[in-house]
């Protein structure tokens, strides 16, 4: 609140003081009238300026039984009057001359300090300090010697005045010096409450009595001046944090010679930038979802989602300690990215130590051969993409008995044993496991059997039509699949249980007729 210093209430207060001090000789020293006006927050008011220029400073010479003299400064302009004003008292008559002049504005919270210096040469020169607020006398305090007291404009006073009186027996001088200090600023909050040691953070400071804050030292972060600041209003300042060592400091505001008291509300923490020294694993699928352990320093202050990034993508994460974070990789395109951690101290610098590679899932486009015996052991060539770094090859759910990654597009794997039927061959890398399709299918085939042949004999010149009965014939793959001894026969597969073959030429003798399929070759017996 704005307050005024002037003479509007001089007459009633003089009357109060006259009644208060009775027959004593009284010197009235105008110390302040306060009229509440419109709110404002200037820390160095016109009233303060006038007071500090000596507007109320004066000296009174008391000589017992003679005339008292007064030397001081006039109030209406603040210029020295350089004159002696004589006041004489007898009985209850007070003839002091007053030159109150124009009123001055004061800011709510400004403090007047009165310093009284006495020099007693004879008798007792006891000063009676009287305080009158809003026309009501609050009481008096007796002083001897030199004293100092303060009065603060607190916004609840419409006016107040001080007076001084001396005992009738005293001889000596009284000097009164008055100074004014601006209202003390307060800091009630700062935002953000932390920033990098390199400085540069824009910090909003909230509090009171900021208007009029000027100079390089007006806002400090610890002992360092803010690199710049703007007083937005009496309750808000925007300041740029200077560089500082890691740790917590108080932000203080100085206004009119008064500095805000420190408290937990004004604290600002300098935070060193985090570092990332390792990530594990260093690769994962483009679909994301991999649990990645990030090792480094300065992680404790990482503030919520977005503080851990894989490239430009935010990750969800848990801060395990100041040196460890567990993050879940987000989805991303194939390629290598830096994992960064951001705290109020800044963002971790990128390096080879923080790199994480997104790997596309492998694909299988063909397998050869497409079938083999249930006993396994077939060497199968798998063709596709993204095979580099393959960690597993499976036939159905069974791991290959061995495999070699020939390139990013080819693997040779040994089929494990499996039950008769069709399975998918799948390849696994850090990028994931290949999706199944008709292109990756491999069929386990049981070995064929021959249970009868008809006729059982024919000419050595061959050409006889022979019906072969048995099982597992459907997969017989072309020429060479039916033999009479070691000689290939031409044939037709009638069904899974019947083949019609034409006997090849051969030497006289008895031979086993065998059928070969991907499941193997039929065992020989008297039946074939």
Image (cartoon, helix red, strand yellow):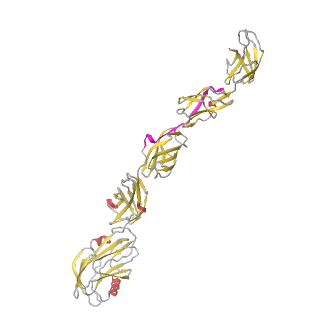
440 is higher (above) or lower (below) than 42: above
Instruction: Determine the image quadrant of residue 123.
Output: bottom left
Residue at 76% across, 11% down: 458
Query: Hey, which residue is sitting farthest right in the picture?
Result: 455
Q: Position of residue 285 (x, y in %)?
A: 54, 39
Span of residues in magenta: 350-372
Q: Is residue 28 magenta?
A: no
Front in this rendered view, residue 45 or 452:
452
Q: Is residue 363 magenta?
A: yes
250 is higher (above) or lower (below) than 515: below
Front in this rendered view, residue 109 or 275:
275
Instruction: Determine the image quadrant of residue 45.
Output: bottom left
Q: Position of residue 188 (x, y in %)?
A: 42, 64
Q: Position of residue 302 (x, y in %)?
A: 47, 51
281 is higher (above) or lower (below) than 190: above
Q: Quadrant of the C terminus?
A: top right
Q: Quadrant of the N terminus?
A: bottom left
100 is higher (above) or lower (below) than 249: below
Q: Position of residue 168 (x, y in %)?
A: 26, 87
Instruction: Determine the image quadrant of residue 265.
Output: bottom left
Residue at 43% across, 41% down: 351
The reply, left or right, for residue 204 in relation to residue 509 is: left
């Amino acid at each position: 609140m704005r307050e005024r210093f002037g003479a509007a209430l001089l007459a009633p207060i003089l009357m109060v003081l006259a009644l208060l001090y009775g027959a004593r000789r009284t010197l009235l020293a105008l110390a302040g009238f306060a009229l509440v006006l419109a709110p404002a927050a200037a820390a160095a008011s016109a009233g303060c300026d006038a007071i500090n220029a000596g507007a109320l400073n004066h000296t009174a010479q008391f000589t017992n039984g003679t005339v008292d003299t007064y030397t001081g400064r006039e109030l209406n302009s603040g210029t020295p009057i350089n004159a002696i004003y004589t006041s004489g008292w007898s009985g209850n008559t007070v003839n002091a001359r007053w030159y109150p002049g124009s009123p001055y504005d004061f800011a709510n919270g400004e403090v007047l300090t009165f310093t009284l210096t006495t020099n007693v040469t004879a008798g007792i020169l006891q000063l009676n300090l009287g305080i009158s607020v809003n026309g009501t006398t609050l009481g008096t305090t007796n002083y001897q010697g030199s004293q100092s007291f303060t009065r603060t404009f607190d916004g609840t006073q419409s006016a107040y005045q001080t007076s001084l009186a001396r005992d009738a027996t005293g001889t000596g001088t009284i000097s009164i010096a008055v100074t004014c200090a601006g209202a003390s600023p307060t800091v009630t909050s700062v935002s953000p409450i932390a920033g990098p040691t390199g400085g540069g953070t824009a910090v909003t400071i909230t509090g009171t009595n900021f208007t009029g804050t000027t100079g390089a030292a007006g806002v400090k972060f610890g002992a360092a001046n803010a690199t710049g600041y703007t007083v937005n209003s009496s309750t808000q300042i925007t300041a740029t944090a200077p560089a500082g060592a890691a740790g917590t400091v108080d932000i203080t505001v100085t206004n009119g010679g008064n500095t805000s008291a420190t408290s937990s509300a004004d604290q600002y923490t300098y935070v060193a930038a985090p570092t990332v020294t390792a990530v594990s694993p260093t690769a994962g699928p483009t679909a994301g979802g991999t649990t990645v352990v990030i090792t480094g320093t300065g992680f404790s202050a990482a503030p919520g989602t977005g503080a851990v990034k894989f490239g430009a993508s935010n990750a969800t994460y848990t801060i395990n300690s100041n040196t460890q974070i567990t993050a879940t990789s987000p989805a991303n395109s194939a390629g290598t990215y830096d994992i960064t951690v951001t705290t109020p101290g800044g963002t971790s610098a990128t390096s080879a130590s923080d790199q994480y590679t997104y790997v596309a899932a492998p694909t299988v486009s063909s397998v050869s051969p497409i079938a083999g015996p249930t006993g396994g052991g077939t060497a199968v060539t798998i063709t596709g993409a993204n095979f580099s770094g393959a960690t597993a090859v499976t036939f159905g759910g069974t791991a290959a008995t061995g495999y070699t990654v020939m390139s990013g597009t080819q693997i040779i794997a040994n089929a494990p044993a499996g039950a008769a039927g069709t399975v998918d061959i799948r390849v696994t890398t850090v990028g994931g496991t290949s999706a199944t399709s008709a292109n990756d299918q491999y069929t386990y085939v049981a070995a064929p059997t021959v249970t009868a042949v008809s006729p059982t004999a024919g000419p050595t010149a061959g050409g006889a039509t022979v019906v072969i009965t048995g099982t597992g014939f459907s997969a017989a793959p072309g020429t060479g699949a039916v033999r009479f001894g070691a000689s290939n026969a031409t044939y037709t597969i009638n069904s899974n249980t019947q083949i019609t073959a034409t006997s090849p030429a051969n030497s006289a003798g008895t031979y086993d007729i065998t059928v070969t399929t991907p499941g193997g070759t039929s065992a020989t017996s008297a039946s074939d």
